[in-house]
Every structure is written in structure tokens, then in C-alpha cells.
Image (cartoon, rainbow, N blue to C red):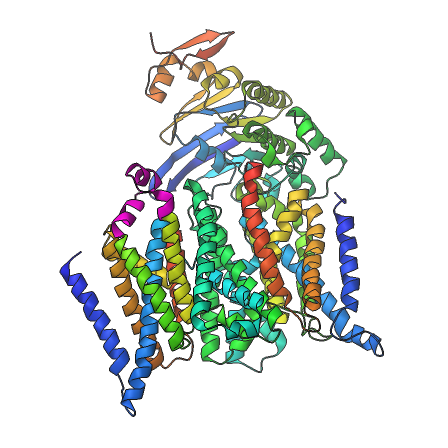
Amino acid sequence: MIEVTDLSFTVGGAQILAPTTLTLPAGQITALIGPNGAGKSTLSRLIARVETPPPGTVRVNGRDVATTPGGLLARELAFLGQHTGLASRLRVRDLVAFGRWPHCHGRPGPADHAAIARALAEFELEPLAQRFLDTLSGGQAQRAHLAMAAAQETPWLILDEPLNNLDLAHARGLMVHLARLRDAGGSVLIVLHDLNFAAAWADHVVAMKAGAVVATGRPEAVLTGPLLSALYDTEIEVTVHGGRPLVLHHLAPA
Amino acid sequence: MGVRLWAALMAGVVLVTGLWLFQGLSGNTGFVLSLRAGKLAALALVAASVAMATVLFQTVAQNRILTPSIMGFDALYLLVQSLALATLGISGFAALPAGPKFLLETALMTGLAAVLFGTLLGRARGADIGRTILSGVILGILFRAGSVLVMRVLDPNANAVVQSVSFANFSRPSVETLLYAAALALPAMALALWLGPRLDVLALGRDRALSLGLPHRAMVLGTLALVAVLTATATALVGPIAFFGLIVAGLAQSFAPGAPHRQLLLLSVGLALIGLIGGQWAFERLLGLKATLSVVLDCGGGLLFLMLLMRGKIR
Amino acid sequence: MTRPLVPTLAALTALALASLFVGAASLDGQAGLLLWVSRIPRTAAAILTGAALAVAGVVMQQILRNRFVEPATTGTPEAAAAGLLAITLVAPAAPIWLKMIVAAVSALLGTVLFAALIRRLPPREIYLVPLSGLILSGVLGAGVTFVGWETDLLPYVSVWLMSGEFSGVIAGRYELLWIAGAAVALAWAAADRFAILGLGPEAATALGLNPRAVLRLGLAVVAIVTAMVVVTVGMFPFVGLIVPNLVTRVMGDNLRAALPVVALAGAGLVLACDLAGRIVIHPYEIPAGTILGVIGALAFLWLLWRGDRDGR
């Protein structure tokens, strides 16, 4: 479980995140949605402690991220941000292997090799394993970074807009992977732009706007026409498909 | 640009010239005066050449933080010089009269510069300007290391060569070199002033210059040739002065933003005269320092350049 | 990834053997003494210098996340020279270890200054980073030259800042370089940490590393290596730049695997330049640093522009 208490964030006098208190349930896929500039990325980065600790506290499985040693936290949560551009010239396998650093500190054992192999297989990277990252397409590189986070094999996985650059097959494949992680007892926090991915795969949705959380709950409770229309300041229709909400955001309202 | 600015500029030039010639005059007045006048002429020629070369180069490069010496022009001249020395042999080289020698070197350097920097600047479109500048700096290092290498091979005991390719020395020029340098640089300057209106069009950029009917390519190569001649003159007289041009051209731009080229060229020449003659006067006679002024100019100009980079004024 | 390791080691061994038998004096009569006092130290010095500079380069490229930086072109040697000059002026009789520490601390300050400087550059302009490094080293160098000139210490300054050479190396006068060698060993032990920092501070944090601590460690390695080299033999440009770039082109940035090859290749390059300098105008010598300036600048230009074909 992730508990966020009175967390806020200010950059140069501009408040990016209003004081927020929030609980993210363990064992579920939580989707973070909202318009541009809502503070979704900031919230996820604060939880993953890659942003300097602001006022307020974040506890991941009971551990305060501000005071827990980084090495310990790295076995509790894995994070993949949006900026994955690399100056390094690494092979795909080497990058994924770095996901095992928190566990083996550079001396991989059989368990680590197994985890690397699993992650490579999961993201269909085996044929690319010996390629250099800078020779891959954007989507392939994104998958390599996802595999690295997956290889960390942490109870919590936090992904900031991971669908960027992925084609539709791999985007769906990622969600399948996350669902499998969840079914095995893992927890996921994912920032999503595409509302229908949230509608189809998330167990829990957090909607944000202008630096504040405006709604949380089951997808069918949050992803409703009136709520989304208010959230994005534009009229949005929602229908139902296969028992889940289907957001018709690409159609002009009737 | 107001009359007051020109008046102030003229007054400044007259002031530093007067200080240089007449301050602390005693003893054999005639002899001291002629000595000072010779050095003054060299300083003035160097100042004007560097200032004009920089303004011209910035127009061609479409960039306000570049100077010929940042891009390795002066180092190229040194390399040409040492290569000439190597091919003709030390004795053969020394036997050549100063005039033809200087002309030969300058012609070689002009050709090389037009090819090399024409190509380099041709590649510098849009986002690649950083790489172009970096390449110019590296070329400068290459030329410098190359001339040290050549001179070392020719004369293993030439320890002083490293210094002579690294910074300018204002007490060097001989009268003969000065005459030939002036014979080459002054027409180049006149030509640059005559080209002023065309340079204004060139500064608009390649596409607009072409659509306005300017023979862009010829204009670029011609301007680069002028830059090469002027830089060769300054370097032959005193050696490399890395950042002086940057300071002068930057000041001229800030005094008269957007002024036409004729004014810009003259303004930067005036500022250069004040800066170099005044600076050398202060350095030699006021402070009595042993080091060369160019070291201080390198330091200050380098800091200015870094500041411009930090402010994102790369384009 | 041992494939490039073996040939590199073989080439270095051949160069080292050649280095023992080439020089102004011929090996006869007192061959043993000559070897022991001059040739072996000289060879060792070149190997240590090359290895240390190449490794310092790769460490700097990882921690600052830019392929085109290295200590020699970012003001570190000039900063070390400034420290040396200061201590020479303040306390000319100071023991060598004190001078060495002052130089190392000063080199560290210079490197930190550069690291702080490039953080203020407009982001995404990767070529501005090495460019400002070169300008910074020019500014620091001009400052040092000015002070050296005014205090009649210019000959020393020239030796520190310009073309380094090994002709003065004899037993008893190069041993500080072993400290640079130790710094290299330290870098190898921390290779994975540097590689992770190379993925970015965010990724490092996410993997449980303290990015600042790794950065500090890397800066210390760079400063120690540079200071020891400058104090002992003078500076050699471009070794730390071209060797890591060429090696990682083949091997990638998996530092733990690449670092030994980088070290050996750097040692080989410097040794080869020293050898060439001894042979070209025998019995005179050309400083290895001068040769490196030419070769290195050419290689740097090639590295800058060949990327066009890779589509990068």
C-alpha cells in the first residue's frame, strides 16, 4: 500500500501539486489520469522519490521514502520516467541487467540471470538483446526500459506514461504484463493518457486536475461522462463495452 | 547611431593615441617617438584587422558568438607558415624576402580557409551550430598542434615555438612586415566597407539573400577570403589573439544594434583601437607588467564567451 | 566480452617491449642500469599515464553524461596547474606530497566548477558541453599563464599545461603515477555505479543509488588522476576522449567489461606516441603530447562527424 499524506510540491512559487492525501491500494493496477499539467507525473515522481522530498510524506508498504535508504527502497518499488534518452551506448541486455543492481550490486547470481531472461522474454526483446540501444526504434527502446524496470521485480511498479512510442500490440502487451503482475500479488501505479486503457485494465482510478486529486475509485465510478467532461473541460461521452466503460473522447458530442 | 557616439569614439581614439605617443616622453624624443609610432601603427593595424575580420565572419556565419580565431583561422595561418618553412627548408625560407613570403602564406591560407570553413559553415544549418563551433575549436587545436609538431621536427630545440603559437606578442613586428601587412590589409578593409550594403543583405540569411538577387555563394567565399587576409595580417604581425574580436564585435553590436555594416565595421574598428592601444598602454606603462596583453584578453574574452553560452545566445 | 581484450593486451605488450629497446642511448655495456633507471620507468610512466587518463575520461563521460568530455579539455589540468603554481609561490620549499595534494584539491575544484557550469547550459545542446569545457580551460590557462609570466615561472607552466612528455622520467621521478593507477583500480571497483549514473540521476535513484555520492566519487577519481599526471609528466590531450569513444563503439558502455580494454588501449596509445616521438627525429625527441594533439584532434573531428552515417 502507498500512503500519501499532505504531499505538496512547488517550483519557483508555482504550485504544481496542492497538499494531497491519498491511499493507493496494494495488489491492484492504479491508473492516474487527467489533463496536461494536472500534476500526474509530479505525483508519480514524488512517490518514486526521484524528485527531492517536499513537504508531506510518502510511505510505500509502510516505509517513508524520505528516510528509507535508497537501496532498500529500490527493492520495494521500480520507477520508469518519461525521459529515457540515454547518453550511454548500452546493449539491451546490459540495460535490463541494471534492473538487478538493487539485488546483486553488480554480481549477478542465477536468480538474477533468470529474472533478466524473464524480463527480456516478457517484452519480446530476446532477438534484440545484443543490439545497442541507439540502434533501436523509439518503441523498441521503450520496451527495453520497461524490461529493466520489470527485472527489478519489486512489489510496486510505477510507470509514467509508459505507452509513449509503443505500437498498439506492444501497448496491449504491456497492460497484459501488468495484469499478470497484479494477479501474482504485485501493485502498479501507471500514469495514462489514453482513458480507454485505464477503463479496460485499471482496478482503481485517480483523476487529477490542476495539481489536485478530484476523484478516486473504481473505473466505472470515475470514468463517467459528467466527471470526465468536467475533468477535461470538454464534453465527453462514455458508453459500456464488455462490462467496462468505453470512452468516446475522439467523437464530437451528439 | 548618434553623432555623440561617433564623437565619443573619435575622442577616445585620439586620447589613447596621444597617450601612447606622448605620455612620459623624455630623453631622445625623436628616437622614442619613431619607435612608438612604429608600434602604434602595428597595434592599430592589428586592432582594425581583428575587428573587421570578426564582424565579417559573424555575418557569414549568421552567428554573433563566433570569431575567426575561435574557429581556428589564426592557427591555420601559423600552420601554413610552418608548412612553408618545412617545404622550403629553413635556409630557403629565410632567404625569401619578407614581402613575397607573406603574400605566399596569405594566399595559401586564404584558399585553405575558403575551402575548409566554407564547407564547415555550409553544414551548419539549424540545430547543428554547436557541432560546427566545436569542430572549429578542435580544428584550431589541430592546426596549433600541427605547427608545433612541424617546427619540432625541423628544429628539435625550438622550445619557444609553443609559446609563439599560443599567444600574441605585441613587441614583435618588423617594419618591413608592417609595410606588407598594411599593403594587404588596407585594401581588404576598403573592400569590406565598399561591400557594406551587400553584407547587409547577406546578413538576412541565405534564402532571403538569394531571393533578393545576391550571388550568395560567391559572396560567402569572397567574405571568407577577406576574413582570411585580415586574420593573416593580424597573426603575422603579433600572433594569435583569441577572443579580442569577440569582445569588440559584441560591444559594437550592443552600442548600435541592427546598424548597417558600414557603421558596424567602423564602430568596431574604433572600439578595437581604443581597447588595444589603451590596453597595451595601461599594461606596459601604467602597470609595468611583463606578461603579454593577449593573455588578459584571452581570459576576459573567454569569460564573456562562456557567459553568452550560459545565456543560450548561441545563435 | 573478452574478444577485444586479448589483442589489446598483446599490442600493449609488444609496444612495451619495443619501448624498452628504443632511445637515444643504445643498449650495450651498462644495459641493465639503463633499463632499470630509465627505460623501465619511462615505459611504466607512459602505461600508467595512458591507462589513467583513458579511464578518467570514461568516468567523466559517464558521470556528466556526455561523450565528448574528458579531463584534459575541460579545465582540470589548468586547475591542477593553478594549485601547483599557488603552492610554489606561497611555499616554494613545500614537500612534494603537499604540492601533490594541493594540485589534486585544486583539480577537484576545477572539475566541480565545470560540472556546475554545464548544468546552467541550455539543455539538449550536447556539443556546448565540450565547447564550454575548452573555453573554460582556455580561461584558466590564460590566468595561470599570466601569473606564471609575472612571477617568472612560465617555463614550469608551459611544461604543466602544454605537450606532456616522458623524456625526463627516471626511476624515483615518476612514482606518483602509481597513485593515478590506484585511482583507476578504484574506478574499476565502482564501474557499475558509474554506468548506472550514466543512465541518468533518476534511473540511479530508482535503482537505489545515491547519484550525488557516485558523482563525488567520479569527480575525485578524475581529479586525482589528472593532478598526478600533470605534476609528474604534464598533460596529454584527447587520450581520455578518443580511447573511450572508440572502445565503447565496439563494446558498448558496459563499463565493467569495457574498462580494462579502455585502460589497456589508453596505455597503448600513449606508449605508441612516446615511441613515435623517440623514433621520428632520432636521436632527438618530439613530446608525446604534441603527437597526441595532432592525432587526437583528427580523431575527435572524425568522431564528431562520422555520426551522420549512423543516423544518430
Towards the viewer: C225 or C166 = C166
Q: Is residue C130 left or right of residue C191?
A: left
Picture quarter with the N terminus of chain B: bottom left
Check residue B205 for magenta coloring.
yes
Q: How many marks?
A: 0
Towards the viewer: A121 or A102 = A121
Residue A13 sits in quarter:
top left
For the record, the magenta segment spans B196-219
Towards the viewer: A166 or A187 = A166
Residue C276, given in percent of the width and then of the height, sits at: 69, 63
Check residue B14 for magenta coloring.
no
Q: Is residue B23 visible?
A: yes
Most prominent secondary structure in the magenta stretch?
A: helix
Residue at 35% across / 21% down in the picture? A232
Q: Tell which residue pokes out farthest to the left in this image.
A: B3
- Up-down: is A229 above or below C237? above
Residue C306, given in percent of the width and then of the height, sits at: 57, 43
Residue at 30% across / 83% down in the picture? B34
Residue at 45% across / 19% down in the picture? A195
Q: Is residue B63 visible?
A: no
Residue B219, given in percent of the width and then of the height, sits at: 35, 47
Q: Tell which residue pokes out farthest to the bottom in this image.
A: B27
Q: Is residue A215 left or right of residue B36?
A: right
